[in-house]
Amino acid sequence: MAARAGEPRQNPDGSTIFEFRFGMDEPVFAGHFPDRPILPGVFQLEMVRVAAELVMQCALGVREIRKAKFQRPILPDETVKLVLKLSEKPDTIQAHAHFSVMGQPAGEMILLLWRNQ
């Protein structure tokens, strides 16, 4: 993902921290919304899947969205912090993600993923 700022960092609790920054000219903002662009929720879900792929080093697909809570809009040129905690189950990988901007909660997601090999 081109908007990733820096390399992922590991937390002692096993979670991984990613940072992203999307400029105003990014195609993801086109039409969403013309007078007040915000990062689409579906794109935030995709950020979680792609971040999980980087951690697991394999292709992953979304099996289920258990939770998708959007707490504040993410605007162009803001640095988004994504804290991702993965746990493996027999047939799935659970991805629990927290988004924040400038220390403010921006969202929380729980996805069930599967290895797409």
Image (spheres, rainbow, N blue to C red):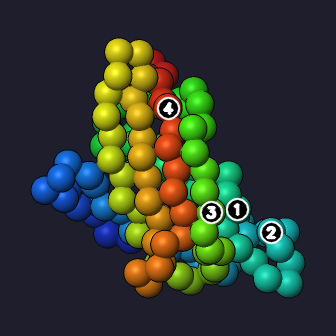
Query: Circle 4 is placed at which residue position?
Result: 112
Amino acid type of the residue that numbered disc 1 sits on in the rendered structure = Pro
Label located before the other in sequence (1 or 4): 1
Query: At x 47% / y 24%, what residue is drawn?
Result: 114
Q: Say the numbered circle drawn on residue 40.
A: 1
Q: Position of residue 40 (x, y in %)?
A: 70, 62
Q: Position of residue 57 (x, y in %)?
A: 32, 35
Amino acid type of the residue that numbered disc 2 sits on in the rendered structure = His
Q: Position of residue 86 (x, y in %)?
A: 33, 40
Kindly state the secondary structure of the residue where label 1 is placed: loop
Label located before the other in sequence (1 or 3): 1
> Of all residues shown, which one is farthest toward the left?
12
Query: Circle 2 is placed at which residue position?
Result: 32
Kindly state the secondary structure of the residue where label 2 is placed: loop
Amino acid type of the residue that numbered disc 3 sits on in the rendered structure = Phe
Q: CB under 8 Å between callouts 2 and 4?
A: no
Query: At x 48% / y 30%, what residue is drawn?
Result: 113
Q: Quadrant of residue 94?
A: top left
Q: Is residue 33 above or below residue 78?
A: above
Query: Circle 3 is placed at which residue position?
Result: 70
> Of all residues shown, which one is farthest toward the top?
90
